[in-house]
Image (cartoon, rainbow, N blue to C red):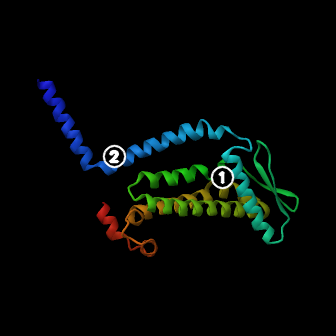
Amino acid sequence: MGGTLFFLFESDFMLQFYKTHSDKINMVLSAILLYSAWHFGYEEFLAKNTTSSGIDWNLNRLLGYETAAWFSLFGYDAKVITYQIYPHLMYLDNKPIISIDTPCNGLPMLYLFASFIIAYPGTVKRKITFITAGVLIIHVLNIMRIIFLSYISIYYADYFYFNHKYAFQIIVYTVVIAMWFYWVLYGNDPKTKWLTGIKDFIRFRFIGRLNQLI
């Protein structure tokens, strides 16, 4: 009898705890589910497809073509040599300048960004809008990263490693964290217009909202 009462008490306590903290619990569970999907879906299957039918191969090629298009605008003879398995190489004036491999395409960052927005509370419509905008921003940042690294490779080769390994990583992560921060403060609130939130965010007028969250 005592065991039954204890079980009922525990069940009622857990139910009340879930009702009180449902948003946070659902977010944690969603994060675990999304991480599991990434690990088993990408790491175990998609990432192993390094041929022309793979998502990484095509994203690498897209970045290469977009970067080459930029240099072509400024009079360079830019072209991308694609390989069936190996990293794609971009040539400027018949000289190999930079290789674009799987770690460079930003796919894990895109997934990480979107996963946070999906897991955090908010309406489906606003999530789709924000994820679409965020993915485009990250992709453009990655194109700019490859462009600048190409210039550095040509004119300041000694600084290539530092900028490739640290500087641009810091920039991209800073932008992603800022977008997450914006979503938490403004993006998930259907009453807040996007432009109003952006203006307040840029002008650091979010202290009041931050205090409410804390």
Q: Which structural element holds mark 1?
A: loop
- Seen at 51% across and 59% down, the residue is 131
Q: Is residue 18 left or right of residue 204?
A: left
Q: Nearer the viewer, residue 59 or 172?
A: 59
* Vertical order, 32 against 61 (above or below): above
- Seen at 74% across and 57% down, the residue is 64
At label 1, counting other C-alpha atoms closer than 10 Å, the crowd grade (few under 14, some 14-19, many 20 or more) is many
Question: Residue 119: horizontal and vertical position, in percent?
Answer: 42, 51
Q: Which residue is mark 1?
A: 105
At label 2, counting other C-alpha atoms closer than 10 Å, the crowd grade (few under 14, some 14-19, many 20 or more) is some
Q: Is residue 183 left or right of residue 97?
A: left
Q: Callout 1, which amino acid?
A: Asn
Residue 152 shows in this picture: no
Q: Which residue is mark 2?
A: 25
Q: CA distance from mark 2 to mark 1?
A: 32 Å
Image quarter of the N terminus: top left
N-terminal-most mark, 2 or 1: 2
